[in-house]
Amino acid sequence: MSTSWVVVPTCLPLVRRRCHTCGSEFFRPSGKFRVNANHKLLDAWLLVLCNGCGETAKLTLLERTNVRDIPSTLLDRLHGNDSDLTAELLQDPLVQRRSRVTLDWGDAWRLDTGGWDHLDREVIDVSVRFAARIPIRPARLIAEGCGLSRAGVERLITEGKVVSMVRLGSPLSGDFTFTLKR
């Protein structure tokens, strides 16, 4: 019998970037955007706040972009400080690369297993789905979902009792399946 697990974000991740004022390494998204017009060209930024001193930094979203090239719905969402747009843009690899930041998902996600009834079975087939692009080691998810230690999961992988088409020791942010044999 197959079981489905879902990795769900619980809040916005922290932004890993060094603060020029206090040296802190983490910023939190403010949920606000700044849009600046220079004739018919627009710049847009997502504002983030330093966890240490509260200093504001900008993550570049648009740079010298013609107004006609920007969908009106996007402009409305930027002007309205849309919180869903904040989450979407934070996960955009282009925005991360352009602003030279990475995301820290540490305590910003949870695993929904649908209950603990699967733990009694000898063989468990699990499909794991990610609701957002959250990089997590599959071994950590298996440990959390099955109530095992990570060392115990690593031992089961070595013994061939956990089988998957993906590498279970490397961070993953895409859907995968695995089979656990006890």
Image (cartoon, helix red, strand yellow):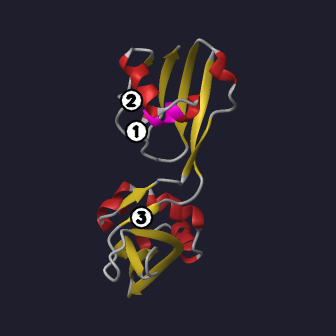
Report the amino acid beneath label 1. Answer: Leu
- Checking the image for residue 172, the label placed there is 1
Alpha-carbon distance for marks 2 and 1?
Answer: 8 Å
Task: Decide which of tag 2 and tag 3 comes sooner along the chain.
Answer: 3
Disc 3 packing (10 Å; few <14; some 14–19; many ≥20): many
Residue annotated with mark 2: 168
Foreground pick, 155 / 163: 155
Residue 134 lies, in percent from the top left, at 46, 47
Q: Quadrant of the N terminus?
A: top right
Query: Measured along the vertical axis of the image, is residue 171 above or below residue 65?
Result: above
Image quadrant in which you'd find residue 136:
top left
Name the secondary structure under disc 1. Answer: loop
Image quadrant in which you'd find residue 99:
bottom left
User: Residue 31 vs residue 63: left or right?
Assistant: right
Residue annotated with mark 3: 15
Disc 1 packing (10 Å; few <14; some 14–19; many ≥20): some
Q: Residue at x 35, y 28 (%)?
A: 167
Is disc 2 in contact with disc 3, using a CB cutoff of under 8 Å? Answer: no
